[in-house]
Amino acid sequence: DQQVKQNSPSLSVQEGRISILNCDYTNSMFDYFLWYKKYPAEGPTFLISISSIKDKNEDGRFTVFLNKSAKHLSLHIVPSQPGDSAVYFCAASGQGAQKLVFGQGTRLTINP
Amino acid sequence: DADVTQTPRNRITKTGKRIMLECSQTKGHDRMYWYRQDPGLGLRLIYYSFDVKDINKGEISDGYSVSRQAQAKFSLSLESAIPNQTALYFCATGRDGGNQPQHFGDGTRLSIL
């Protein structure tokens, strides 16, 4: 039973444009959400997070939006750069960050 | 130097063998985790430990065991490896208290023939 779902296995975006990665969750007890970025042969690296008391968090080119009523979050990258090409995982937790539940990942490719 | 170090980085072994994957950290975090990644399934939690005397099963603990030898060391064992345990394994650490992200090692690619 997949509690966190990323329904797009891959996404291709032109350099300079906006990349939008989506994530849906089913467990209403989740109150903390994170995005991780993963390059080949490396571990996931933390990108940005949001608490359920907020609906938006921004860090430079990266913005995460949370829609609690729809149980949906999204990651916006503006402008997209070639170095953003990676696999992106969303994750959720209901107890701080004690136990994370991950989505399947979305492979983002930024084309020149 | 990496804050979270996993050894070995790659391992090929045969069905029935006992395997140990090791993780050490210099971040000073109390919490440590083991995940496995399979294609199309994301990362799934195997075991986690909040301190040296605390060990908890995760979502998919069957066939695995762990040992927390010290605050900085957390090892994962496959007592009798089977082919469907072929996967990418990640160790992670986290701080106590509140909403904090976890920090991952670079993984161990394990193949069981």
Image (cartoon, coloured by chain):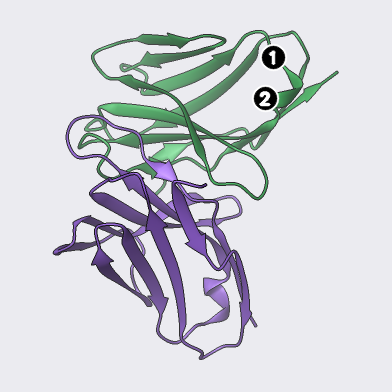
Chain colours: A green, B purple
Q: Residues within 10 Å of mark 2 (few under 14, many from 20)?
A: some
Could you tell me which chain the residue with mark 2 belongs to? A
**Extreme residue toward the right, this view:** A112
**Extreme residue toward the bottom, this view:** B16
Could you tell me which chain the residue with mark 1 belongs to? A
Q: Nearer the viewer, residue A68 or B74?
A: B74
Q: In the picture provided, is B62 more to the left or to the right than A74?
A: left
Q: Is residue B3 above or below residue B5?
A: above
Q: Is residue A85 above or below residue A81?
A: below
Q: Residue at x 55, y 51 (%)?
A: B106
Counting the numbered discs, the total is: 2
Dots 2 and 1: beta carbons under 8 Å? yes
Q: Nearer the viewer, residue A25 or B30?
A: B30
Q: Quadrant of residue A102?
A: top left
Residue B76: x %, y % from top left: 38, 70
Q: Quadrant of residue A12?
A: top right
Q: In the picture provided, is A78 more to the left or to the right than B32?
A: right
Q: Residues within 10 Å of mark 1 (few under 14, many from 20)?
A: many
Residue B49: x %, y % from top left: 23, 57
Name the secondary structure under disc 2.
Answer: helix
Q: Quadrant of residue A83?
A: top right
Res. A80 mark: 1
Amino acid at the residue labelled 1:
Ser
Is disc 1 on the same chain as disc 2? yes
Residue A27: x %, y % from top left: 29, 35
Name the secondary structure under disc 1.
Answer: loop
Q: Residue at x 67, y 8 (%)?
A: A79
Amino acid at the residue labelled 2:
Asp
Q: Residue at x 34, y 10 (%)?
A: A55
Q: According to the image, label 2 marks what residue?
A: A84
Q: CA distance from mark 2 to mark 1?
A: 7 Å
